[in-house]
Amino acid sequence: MTTSDPAVPAVTFRCSEAARERDDPFVATAPPARCWLLVEHPGPWGHQALGDAGYAPEVVEAIDAFCRRRGARFQLIRRSRARGEPAADRGRFALVDTTPGAESVRWGRVASADELPAALADVEAVTTPSSEPVYLVCAHGRHDACCAMRGRPVAAALSMTHPDRTWETTHTGGDRFAANLVLLPHGLVLGRVPATEAVAVVERYAAGEVDTTWVRGRSFLSAPAQAAQHHARLAYDEPGVDALRVLGAEAREQGVTEVTLDGGPERGTIAVVVRERWVASPTPLTCSAGRAASMRVYDLVGVTSVSGVHGLDVSVAGTAG
């Protein structure tokens, strides 16, 4: 947003700056995705990743159908590069399954985008499993300037130490939380990651732990389950990536959900109750939105260890409804 009065200096609105000033909560904002389909594309990237990629209509249709069938999120990816360095497009693509306990990364290669429909029709046969994690950094400036301004320094920092694992990517949701970082194959979506902390964040993830400071959620889970898992991590000081697996979720009443988690042999089953509410934002939630909107947040109602040797009962009184 800018002023139209020539006598007043123009001030460019940046959604990420406004969100930081308000300290917008970002727990339970990871975009839903059972799988992630990554396709190498050197750019430039248009506003819409798939629609503006320059692919033939039949390629777009095949990718769209595949993503709907698999519950996959489509992302264009490219290597982070220095200004003036030529773009590289070697036709790589990957299918990442984020199912808890069955996470996997499979890489393949095509000579051109026109070969993608055939490759996706038999994707397991034409791809090779990889044990290497994948680090996606949203740097999609055409979608939101904040993503490029805050994302590219993070991608550059990670590329210095983990060049084979790091990719710039298109819109991952939550522009105002830039820089956004996705850790695959677990589908952990992180927000407001500083470039100075990025290397430590991914190295901790590679070691099997996650810092709750930056976690927006896990894309495989529903929003209430993301919130419940986060609150349980805080209550039990549990950093393990594979810990606190979601067992189920049940709606209690309007906006209230009880989520059960596997706390392991010592904690047993954990029940977490969260309440959804909407908060009006005084400014737009993205740089290009043009008008203010509301954001969804999840309050903790209580955390209870249903069974296990070491119990914990945390109740929160007076939670907003």
Image (spheres, helix red, strand yellow):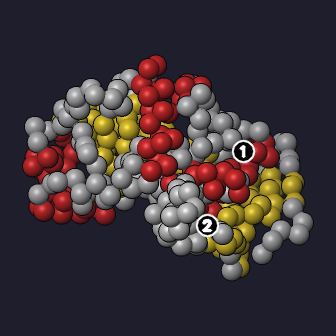
Q: Residue furthest bottom?
A: 254
Q: Nearer the viewer, mark 2 or mark 1?
A: 2
190 or 177, nearer to the observer: 177
- Across and down, in percent, residue 189 comes to 53, 46
105 vs 5: above or below: above
Residue depicted at x 25% and y 43%: 43
Q: Mark 2 is on which residue type? A: Thr
Of helix, strand and loop, which one carries label 1?
helix
Question: What label sits on residue 283 in the rendered view?
Answer: 2
Q: Is residue 216 left or right of residue 125?
A: right
Q: Mark 1 is on which residue type? A: Arg
Q: Residue furthest right?
A: 317
248 vs 133: above or below: below
Observer able to see residue 290: yes
- Across and down, in percent, residue 24 comes to 67, 57
Give the residue pinned by disc 1: 233
Image quadrant in which you'd find residue 61? bottom left
Q: Residues within 10 Å of mark 1 (few under 14, many from 20)?
A: some
Q: Is residue 231 left or right of residue 12?
A: right
Residue depicted at x 19% and y 59%: 60
